[in-house]
Image (spheres, grey):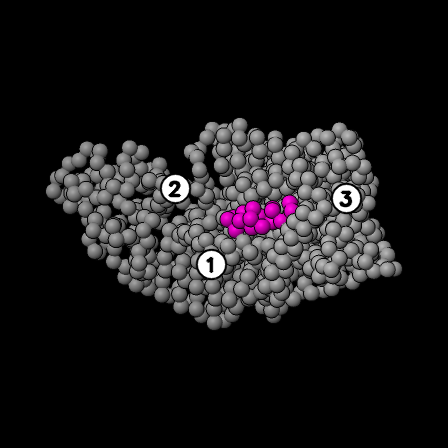
Amino acid sequence: MGGDDDRIEDSSVRLMASSNDGIVDGVGGGESRWVDGSEVDSESPPWSLLDENDSGQGYGSMRRRLVKKPKRVDSFDVEAMEIAGAHHRHSKDLSVWQNLALAFQTLGVVYGDMGTSPLYVFTDVFSKVPIRSEVDVLGALSLVIYTIALIPLAKYVFIVLKANDNGEGGTFALYSLICRHAKVNMLPNRQPADENISSYRLKLPTPELERALNIKETLEKRSSLKTLLLLLVLTGTSMVIGDGILTPAMSVMSAVSGLQGEVSGFGTSAVVIVSIIILLGLFSIQRFGTGKVGFMFAPVLALWFFSLGAIGIYNLVKYDISVLKALNPAYIYFFFKKNSSAAWSALGGCVLCITGAEAMFADLGHFSVQSVQIAFTCVVFPCLLLAYMGQASYLMKYPDSASRIFYDSVPGSLFWPIFVIATLAATIASQAMISATFSCVKQAMALGCFPRLKIVHTSRKLMGQIYIPVINYFLMIMCIIVVSIFQNTTDIANAYGIAEVGVMIVSTTLVTLVMLLIWRTNLFLALCFPLVFGSIELIYLSAVLSKILEGGWLPLAFASFFLCVMYTWNYGSVLKYHSEVREKISMDFMLELGSTLGTVRVPGIGLLYNELVQGVPSIFGQFLLSLPAIHSTIVFVCIKYVPVPVVPQEERFLFRRVCPKDYHMFRCVARYGYKDVRKEGHHVFEQLLVESLEKFLRREAQDLAIESNLNEYFDNVSERSRDSGAAGDGTDELRIPLMQDQRPEEPGSSISEETSPAFPSSVVSLDEDPSLEYELSALREAMDSGFTYLLAHGDVRAKKNSVFFKKLVINYFYAFLRNNCRAGAANMSVPHMNILQVGMTYMV
């Protein structure tokens, strides 16, 4: 076992038959071996049933070929395949009514940001292009119409939503999707067993193509491309966090500014003060969770969209229905021809009409693809078009109202009801973006790209509803600073546009990679996607970047800050992992120590936490040197996040025995998805771990019993064949199905019913193993004595011969983040009386 354990990552070895995975247990030698399909003739179907005409020589030939190559499938893989076969889950399509109900709910969660954009779009556009003729109004309206039609409708609704990761969306979902199909993750802890998680694999729409393989090989071989991909994902995530700062400031100020023309003496200072008060209240209630008021979101936004559509129709009919001419895209050309550079600058305001479009994809995990599509095409899209057409119709008659067009276009008797609804809608839009920021940070933490922070779960039913106090107060302070400094929505809009377009460009790049690598789309169609939508987004980006000095620097500063934090944390974590791999304790040394480990073994279970998926971590040596005794049962626990949204509970734990049986040492990999919430307390975790360990021990004993019975059976058959003088040329081979996808119904059996007729009952009978009972009783005794958490207080330092920049990043920046982030013991909610810690320095 030692030679295989020294590798960071085991190769995947499988016996393939009709696209099904299976494992053949070695039947020779004194120890259990796992062998792969290369040891069976490729011309012989490995799953053929036993033929009565096979001679004893055939049995012997099969045994020799099974034993001659000691290749071994990792025991993690064996366990994972058994679990995946037993607990395979099939997704069910939702009914029409369920999709309609979800579509109604999306109005309050997904579309709040985009729905409040009529509050400020035309105000910002016409602050850069004064209205002097109908071409200005019709051109701006045509720009808005086709921007909404191309980006949210054509790009997101019809293409990007299909690039979901088992129903999850967002930048990290795309990254995890790519990580599963190419080994581009910077942390080298991927295992073949991870591929057997029921949510890991995808059905590919087309056969494998040479182009996709070339892309995969290129990504895996060039570390610079892996780093570039990671930086791209982190940049998109940083922009999303920047949105979490700018969205509340922009939405709340836009809603409150409606009072300026309605209440006398209500000036800019009053708008700022009221906005800050609302923001303080908004961030103060985050700790209660969105679940408390979530049922109100959808009705309020539904009323808001109905009001937008109704007011739009009213203005169209009353003022100037000729604005429908803006459906002709030629007015976009006339608009640019007339205003030239000013029109280019106005694009920065036009892009605000699609703020929140990324939420359609990022919040997909709470809904279905069909529900998001239905809500946008049937409600959001038509209502927004009517709202913008109504405002344009009003501007055709009252061009001087551009500075507060939304509230001026509302009929006088409806001002206060609309103001209340608009304020509520703006608050809800802010709430959705704040919650999305929490989820985004949590995903980054799961994938090793963000320092550990305290996460509070605000709902017992919905695991996605979380609250991160540090991020909440950081967003609140930044929002108040933004409102206090800028004091108007125009400069905030300049910053807002850069953050939105930046996220969209990242999504376009990643979806293009998904098309080429995973979907294997036709090359022409795959390139059309970035050429069409990427070009539009780059045009908008060039327009908003021209406003860097007028507020556009703000999201770039936020993005740069969070990008540095996330990349520094990832960089330091990867170096620390490599250092742990290099300093592993060799298996030869463990065997020399003996089962006592050179110390006294006392009753109890020691859970030693580390990041290694294989091998004995060096920190274990520190515990052996520092402690006068060690526990009778040792479990090396690795909390590992795999690139899938959710890992089912029954597939959570994988076990392997470390060292011989009398050592009572095990390796446990506890796998979580990036959307999983580690909500269980330490008592529940301990119970689940022990139950899984008992299942592992029983399964191991069953496999050994089967192997022993098969060995005895083969020996008897060979002996009878020699006695009868039977001769065989060795061309006919014994082919036995030891594992199949059809799992037995009885938990006490590990051979499928299809196999049993081929052998006498003595082969498949499993007598109770005394050694198993002894080991289970020892485990229960250790459990009764209690659990102790063995943790390392690690210090990471750069080597003396490292370059100055590496020393600066590791010794100061990364060390600062590690010293101020949440400790591992706090993350596991373990009582301090159950913890033993030793210090260790990792030189990287």
Q: Nearer the viewer, residue 585 or 543?
A: 543
Q: Secondary structure at mark 3?
A: helix
Q: Which residue is mark 3?
A: 397
Image-based side of 598 in relation to 500, left or right:
left
Q: Secondary structure at mark 2?
A: loop
| Residue found at x 65% / y 55% | 307
Q: Which residue is mark 2?
A: 14
Determine which of the numbered discs, if any, sits on residue 666 in the image.
Answer: none
- Measuring from the top left, give residue 206's x and y in whole percent: 43, 35
Q: Which residue is mark 1?
A: 649
The CA span between labels 2 and 3 is 74 Å
- Measuring from the top left, give residue 27's x and y in whole percent: 30, 46
Q: Nearer the observer, disc 1 or disc 2?
A: 1
Q: Residues within 10 Å of mark 1 (few under 14, many from 20)?
A: few
Confirm whether residue 50 shows in the render.
yes
Q: Nearer the observer, disc 1 or disc 3?
A: 3
